[in-house]
Image (cartoon, rainbow, N blue to C red):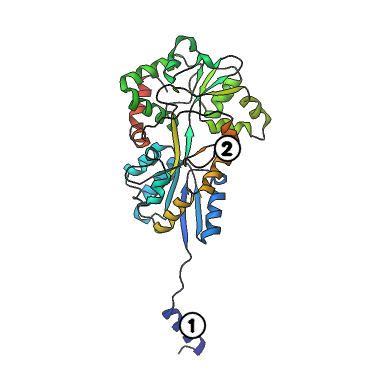
Amino acid sequence: MLKPVAALILGLSALAPVQAAEEVNVYSARKEALIKPVLDKFTAQTGIKVNLITGNADTLLSRIATEGQFSPADILVTTDVGRLQWAKESNLLQSVQSDEIKGLVPQNLRDQNNQWFALTLRARPVMYAIDRVKPEELGRLEDLTDAKWKGRICVRSSSNIYNQSMVSALMEQIGEQATLAWAKGLVKNFARPPKGGDRDQIKAVAAGQCDIAIANTYYLIGMLGDADQSQVDAAKKVAVFWPNQQDRGTHVNISGAGVTKYAPNAENAKALLSFMLNKESQQWYAEHNGEYPVRQDVEISDSLKALGKFKAESIPLEKVGARNADALMLMNKAGWK
């Protein structure tokens, strides 16, 4: 027989079950330092606990796919439209019906079915050695096939998704045959076989191994603010040139997010997605990540202002992400390994 106190507790439990704490589970390909401050502010303002798991972008996608309907993931935050589109095509995301969110993200920077949305904008211009290249020598990305650049260009390998998306965007805008011809011409002008990341391309220019590199701007900004003086010194030897300003604009990509198909806390995930697009969050990204805000009403950081204004491609990124596999095959066909 239950003691009176135990019976009372049992009775109260049956009448008023304890509510689980509000939470949201984030799978993020962005490093903790580049997202956690925003998540902490979200918790402080809403009381919703954020459980953050960070990891390799492709590994996280595979994990969500493997976990299936039992995945605890509520929201996926990742880099490059190619990965976001892959998540959509793999049926890992759900549509988010929100006029507020759609109103904040330009149409070309979000999925037409509202399954993923841009959080930041990333530019991939040409970078050149200040002491060996004059900016007036540069113009369009297509001009990098000119014989004058033979043995002078550094770029990452074809396995890099940033390059795949850049080539995919080119295919969509100038056609497959013209893009193949461009890729073959670019390969002929490589200073060395592709290796390393974007910082390695910038450092190679600084070291005189090549005169031109193609890289994302936030890598250069990160080097300029690095605690390692050698990184700063290398970055100061390089300047940014914005190609294709007289026609389609410079290639841009995104970091973005989507609510997962089986999100156990879908409403909290939508609230977080909206929060990451508010002015305060967008301003934080601009100041700390070296990336451009997707909102037109948020000012860019001083470090980005120093790189100058530029015209960006306006192609719908959904089309870019859909052609990444084709872009990889084209690059390999061109000898871009």
Could you say which quadrant of the image residue 186 lies in?
top left
Q: Which mark is residue 9?
A: 1
Instruction: Between residue 11 and residue 250, name the one nearer to us.
Output: 250
Callout 2, which amino acid? Answer: Ser
Q: Which mark is residue 336?
A: none
Which x, y percent locates residue 83?
Answer: 40, 39
Q: Residue furthest front?
A: 297
Q: Residue at x 42, y 80 (%)?
A: 15
288 shown above or below 174: below
Q: Residue at x 67, y 32 (%)?
A: 228
Which x, y percent locates residue 321?
Answer: 36, 35
Instruction: Between residue 100 and residue 170, name the one nearer to us.
Output: 100
311 shown above or below 297: above
- Viewer-nearest of discs 2 and 1: 2
Q: Judging from the image, what secondary structure is the residue with disc 1 in?
A: helix
Q: Residue furthest top?
A: 147
Q: Which mark is residue 301?
A: 2
Instruction: Between residue 194 and residue 111, name the one nearer to us.
Output: 111
Which x, y percent locates residue 255?
Answer: 46, 40
Residue 327 is left or right of residue 194, and the answer is left
Quadrant where the N terminus sits is bottom left
Callout 1, which amino acid? Answer: Ile
Whole-angstrom CA distance, mark 2 to mark 1, is 57 Å
